[in-house]
Each structure stands twice: as structure tokens, then as C-alpha cells.
Image (cartoon, rainbow, N blue to C red):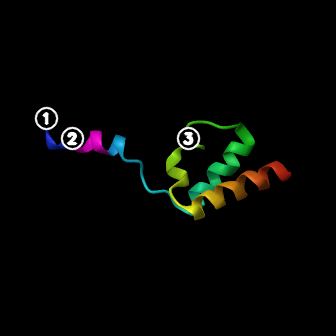
């Protein structure tokens, strides 16, 4: 197996690091469109801060 293919496989297994802005955006998306694999992916909740931002985005969307 080539190094390129190996790197591609590893990228699929290891989720990218998510930031607070992304978490907030996905929380809002969940509030508007319902839960999906993308807006509720476990990588969003990789830190307490991201989880709080996701919740904030969800709350703000539902408050409207």
C-alpha cells in the first residue's frame, strides 16, 4: 500500500479538530434542520467549550 493511500485511510479514521465557531454553526444547523451525521458528529464535542458552543447555537435557533 502506498503512503498516499495509507494517509488517506488515516484521515478518514481520525476526525479533524473542530473549533468553537464550527461547533456553534453545527448547533444552529441542528436546530434548523434536525440532527444529522454532520451537525451531531462526535468530533464537534471534542472539548467542553465546543459542546457549550453547540448547545448555544441550538438554543438560539430554538428561541426564535
Whole-Å distance between the Cαs marked 3 and 2? 24 Å
Q: Is residue 40 magenta?
A: no
As helix, strand or loop, the secondary structure at mark 2 comes to helix
**Which residue is more in the foreground, 49 or 60?**
49
Q: Earlier in the sequence, mark 3 or mark 1?
A: 1
Q: Is residue 6 magenta?
A: yes
Magenta span covers which residues?
5-10
Residue underneath mark 2: 6
Give neighbour class at mark 1: few <14, some 14-19, many 20+ (Cα, 10 Å): few
Residue at 68% x, 43% y: name it.
30
Q: Quadrant of the N terminus?
A: top left
Residue underneath mark 1: 1
Residue at 61% x, 36% y: name it.
36
Q: Decide: marks 1, 2 in contact (CB < 8 A)?
A: yes
| Residue 12 rendering spot, x and y as whole percentages | 35, 41
Residue underneath mark 3: 38
Amino acid at each position: 500500500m502506498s503512503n498516499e493511500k495509507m494517509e488517506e485511510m488515516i484521515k478518514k479514521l481520525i476526525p479533524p479538530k473542530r473549533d468553537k465557531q464550527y461547533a456553534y454553526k453545527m448547533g444552529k444547523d441542528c436546530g434548523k434542520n434536525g440532527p444529522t451525521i454532520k451537525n451531531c458528529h462526535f468530533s464537534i464535542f471534542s472539548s467542553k467549550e465546543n459542546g457549550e458552543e453547540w448547545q448555544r447555537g441550538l438554543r438560539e435557533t430554538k428561541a426564535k
